[in-house]
Amino acid sequence: MKINDFIEQCKNNDQFNYNQMEEILQGFADNLTIEQVKIYAVPKFNWQQMEQIRRGLEDSLTIEQVKLYSTPEFDWEQMYEIRFGLEDNLTMEQVKVLVNPNFSWQQIQKIRKFIKDNNDIPIKTIKFLIGLNCI
């Protein structure tokens, strides 16, 4: 499928609002592929969630990394914190600790900063501390 055909298909299905369409168009303007744009060209995502997914792809995160937070269960602020952890060179194992839609974005941020500042603490210990509400 060509980019113009994909854009027309998105416009014609009437499931995307103006801001969502802007995110889809911005992805193509920033040289994302159709496969990459399809990850976030989903009506369930609001435009802010779409933006966080798009930014991750533009910032050279892998599709596997982006898919960690590409779910409608996360609001855009949670997505931002997870994306920031990936861009801040946390390991996939460390980032997976953050991937919990029950955590508020503030909790994700606090855990992310703790992991970054205490990189030598095993993940098992971090999970234990989270369970005790120590982080």
Image: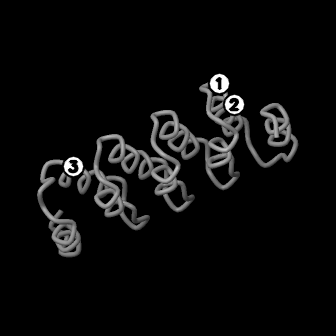
41 relative to 9 in the view: left or right: left
Q: Amino acid at mark 2?
A: Leu
Comparing labels 1 and 3, the label whose residue is closer to the camera: 1
**Badge 2 is on which residue?**
25
The amino acid type found where label 1 is placed reads Ala
The picture quadrant where one finds residue 84 is: top left
Label 2, label 1: how far apart the Cα atoms are: 6 Å
Q: Could you tell me which secondary element the residue under label 2 belongs to?
A: helix
Farthest residue to the top: give it: 29
Pointer 1: what residue? 29
Q: Mark 1 touching mark 3, by CB under 8 A?
A: no
Q: Earlier in the sequence, mark 2 or mark 3?
A: 2
Residue linked to disc 3: 113
* Quarter of the rendering containing residue 115: bottom left
Q: Residue at x 66, y 55 (%)?
A: 44
- The quarter of the image holding the C terminus is bottom left
**Amino acid type of the residue that numbered disc 3 sits on in the rendered structure:** Lys
Q: Quadrant of the N terminus?
A: top right
Q: CA distance from mark 1 to mark 3?
A: 33 Å
At numbered mark 3, what does the secondary structure look like: helix, strand or loop?
Answer: helix
Position of residue 92 measured from the top left corner of the image (x, y, whole percent): 35, 56
Q: Position of residue 5 (x, y in %)?
A: 85, 36
* Label 2 CA crowd tier, 10 Å (few <14, some 14–19, many 20+): some
